[in-house]
Image (cartoon, rainbow, N blue to C red):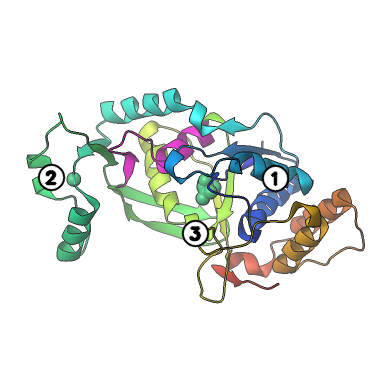
Amino acid sequence: MYIGRFAPSPTGPLHMGSLLAAVISYFDAKAHQGQWLVRIEDIDPPREQPGAADAILTTLEAHGLEWDGPVVYQSQRQAAYQDAIEQLRSQDAIYPCQCSRKQLAEYQQQSGSYPHPEHCIQSLDLKQPYALRARPGQYQYQDLYQGTQQGIDGHFVVKRRDQLFAYQLAVVVDDHAQQISHVIRGHDLLDSTPKQLLLYQALGFEPPQFGHFPVIVGENGQKLSKQNFAPAIDDSCAINNLQQVFRYLGFTIPDTHNLEELLDSGCKQWQRGLPAMIQQQAIQQTF
Ligand code: GLU
Ligand code: ZN
């Protein structure tokens, strides 16, 4: 059974890059007769923009991207994340750390690789706030679009010093709880997958299949993002926006102004075989 998802962080409205992510995960789910879930990843309040979660859902609706089941909000899932922390702790899969970002960067520069500094363990004072980090381990997996990926990863934060749960932890706990079978997302998250796989291993969860498609980059080579001033999607131009997504995918644009027909054509074209562009890391923005 295929269950896919789109999991935006409500740091701002959707832009063309995130709309592409929504549409590709939707096409892949529908092409497999699967479900497509939406999860709002609102676990980092300082980075959130008021109203962004609603704006994202409105944009999805305006583009005919109907999700299955209720929307899950990560802000409501703290207890599940804490349970996972306890489980990881009991397996000794995580360790406390009081290094500052600066200390770690300096240490990394000196030692080249990234073993955790010994002094951190020796000078630990558990009465002071600390972060929890994952112990390193090996991973290997077959990315649906990027081929075999393997290596060693670890030392990433699972719970922050300010007590907020990290994205890497929350996403694994939720993808498992929602029985996600396919995580189809942008290449900008390829680096996160090894970390998530280590958590799947430590928690004894079966990992989903992963596929990372190219992100849209602007003239400066940077991915479209709020920080890069990517314009917000205009909901009143849904047909045009979807046609633009078709162009990025190299799809034929059907002669229709009906959302449902347009999306249906997209699913069928997706089903015929992966567009060549999917294996790239980045595609140039075109307007
Ligand atoms: N919430 C993450 C983001 O917007 C994506 C999560 C995911 O697809 O795994 O960047
Ligand atoms: Zn440390």
User: Which dot, 1 or 3, sits closer to the camera?
Assistant: 3
Q: Is residue 252 above or below residue 14?
A: below
Q: Is residue 86 left or right of residue 147?
A: left
> Who comes first in sequence, dot 1 or dot 2?
1
Observer able to see residue 44: no
Q: What residue is disc 1 on? A: 29
> Who comes first in sequence, dot 1 or dot 3?
1
Q: Residue at x 8, y 40 (%)?
A: 123
Q: Is residue 272 above or below residue 221?
A: above
Q: Which mark is residue 120?
A: 2
Q: Quadrant of the C terminus?
A: bottom right
Is the distance from the Cβ of mark 3 to the nearest ligand 1 atom less than 8 Å?
yes
Is the distance from the Cβ of mark 2 to the nearest ligand 2 atom less than 8 Å?
yes
Q: CA distance from mark 1 to mark 3?
A: 20 Å
Q: What residue is disc 3 on? A: 188
Segment tinted magenta in the rendering: 156-176
Q: Quadrant of ligand 2?
A: top left
User: Which dot, 1 or 2, sits closer to the camera?
Assistant: 2
> Label 3's element?
helix
Q: CA distance from mark 1 to mark 2?
A: 45 Å
Q: Which residue occupies the foreground of this view, 82 or 90?
A: 82
Q: Residue at x 39, y 40 (%)?
A: 166
Q: Is residue 239 left or right of residue 1?
A: right
Residue 110 is drawn in which quadrant? bottom left
